[in-house]
Amino acid sequence: MICRLLTPLRLLALPILLGTALSACALGRSVVDIKAPASVAAAGETAVKITEVSDSRHFTVNPRDPSEPSLGDAAEINDPKITARAIGRKRGGFGGAFGDVVLPEGATVAGLVRDAAQTALQDEGYRIVSEGSPDYAGALPLALDVEQFWGWYTPGFASVDVSFKSRIIMTGDPLVGSGAANAEGFANYSSSVGIFESDWAELVKNGLADLTAKMKQRIKAPSEISK
């Protein structure tokens, strides 16, 4: 089902039609499928491994700041099966929080962040290895912590605006140095009509692409690492 959030202008013009649309669309949960950007670079010689991807986001039901992760059902804010998939929250024309935006079952935010990091590493000239590989023990480690990964809606009179922000903490010496390195990705989309589910998918996809580029900037190149 294709759903969108409609502007206050349309709410004033078509109250009956839009009331139906809001109850059927904005109030319900939307499921969007998103793929992280893939690397087109050839794998390098230096082996790396992603040892952990943790999701440290904190969810509430109705935060004052729409950029904070939230879910419509209070019973689900501590359910990792739901929070691991949650990527945004729809809102009405006057800012009231409505339906959730989530990834399909089987997909997670941690998985998207892992894929983005793998792309950044391969673009930078590394070869990613997994457990079971003979090179795993000696591979350079990288751990990731998801502090923020969220899309939100900002109401306006004649337009709608959705934004996305991610903040990932990267740890792993020597890949990012002895301390933690932050990587933040951003994206924004505005429309005078409304926000479709496809727009949410494109928003997060663009935010992931920006995050991947920021990760790449924080990762040292193989030539910078002392042997």
Image: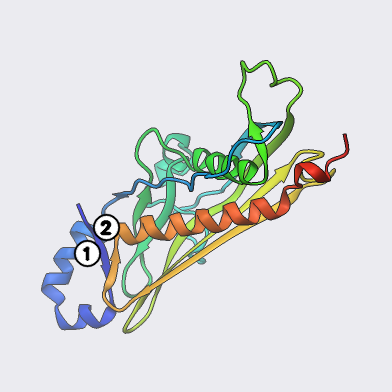
Residue 30: give x, y in percent of width and height.
Answer: 30, 51
Residue at the extreme front of the image, as rendered: 42
Using residue 175 as the reference point, say whether residue 166 is left or right of it. left
Density class for disc 1 (Cα within 10 Å; few <14, some 14-19, many ≥20) is many
Give the Cα separation between the discs numbered 2 and 1: 6 Å
User: For the residue marked with disc 2, what is the amino acid?
Assistant: Leu
Res. 166 visible in picture: no
Asked if the residues shown at circle 2 and circle 1 are in contact, with their CB atoms under 8 angstroms apart, the answer is yes
Residue at the extreme right of the image, as rendered: 226
Residue 97: give x, y in percent of width and height.
Answer: 37, 62
In-front residue for pair 127/183? 127
Residue under the point 37% across and 59% down: 200
In-front residue for pair 104/90? 104
Residue 9: give x, y in percent of width and height.
Answer: 25, 83
Using residue 89 as the reference point, say whether residue 80 is left or right of it. right
Q: Residue 27, labelled with which disc?
A: 2
Q: Describe the element under mark 2 as helix, strand or loop.
A: loop
- Quadrant housing the C terminus: top right
> 214 above or below 132?
below
| Colour setting | rainbow
User: For the residue marked with disc 1, what is the amino acid?
Assistant: Leu
Q: Describe the element under mark 1 as helix, strand or loop.
A: helix
Residue under the point 17% across and 71% down: 18
Question: Which quadrant of the figure has residue 144?
Answer: top right
Density class for disc 2 (Cα within 10 Å; few <14, some 14-19, many ≥20) is some
Q: Which of the two labelled residues, at mark 2 and mark 1, occupies the earlier sequence position?
A: 1
In-front residue for pair 34/222? 222
Residue under the point 50% across and 38% down: 111
Using residue 50 as the reference point, say whether residue 24 is left or right of it. left
Q: Residue 22, labelled with which disc?
A: 1
